[in-house]
């Protein structure tokens, strides 16, 4: 149990650090333009890969994270979305299907 909790905490810290890379102006939210701009960076893509996220479509990824459809992603939405979508690439595909319905 300790190992599982430590692993989850490690992922949470990585996700918070990644969020701060997108939110350079410290507004507390990420817009689609901010996400799209940073996703072109190989360093950011590699960071997502270390989290177990295969982000191949910026718009779909943004919409899956923006749960309230407010046009911006809060740290809570980003954190919970990244944790929810981690794992095999199929997880994001399933979420996209659910979202499209």
Image: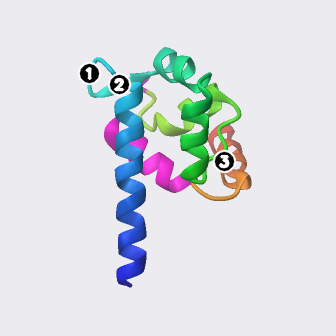
According to the image, label 2 marks what residue? 23
Name which of mark 3 and mark 2 comes first in the sequence.
2
Name the side, left or right, on which 79 lies relative to 40: left
Q: Is 39 placed left or right of 57 in the picture?
A: left
Distance of label 1 from label 3 (alpha carbons): 27 Å
From which residue to which does the magenta span run?
70-85
Camera sees residue 83: yes
Dominant secondary structure, magenta: helix
SS at mark 1 in the image: loop
The circle drawn on residue 92 is 3
Query: Which one is in front in this view, the residue at disc 1 or the one at disc 3?
Result: 1
The structure residue drawn at horizontal position 66% and vertical position 47%, both measured from the top left corner, is 92
Numbered tag placed on residue 27 in the rendering: 1
Give the SS element for disc 3. helix
Real-space CA distance between mark 3 and mark 2, rounded to the nearest whole angstrom: 23 Å
Residue at 33%, 38% in the rendered image: 75
- Among the 4 quarters of the image, the one containing residue 1: bottom left
Q: Position of residue 90 (x, y in %)?
A: 74, 54
Residue 99: x %, y % from top left:
62, 41
Q: Is residue 84 above or below residue 18?
A: below
| Residue sticking out furthest to the bottom | 1
């Amino acid at each position: 149990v300790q190992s599982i909790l430590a692993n989850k905490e490690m992922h949470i810290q990585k996700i918070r650090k990644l969020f701060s890379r997108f939110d350079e102006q410290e507004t507390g939210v990420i817009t689609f333009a901010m996400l799209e701009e940073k996703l072109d960076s190989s360093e950011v893509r590699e960071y997502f890969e270390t989290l177990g996220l295969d982000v191949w479509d910026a718009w779909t990824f943004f919409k899956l994270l923006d749960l309230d459809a407010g046009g911006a992603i809060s740290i809570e939405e980003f954190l919970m979305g990244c944790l929810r979508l981690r794992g095999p690439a199929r997880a994001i595909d399933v979420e996209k299907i659910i979202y499209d319905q």
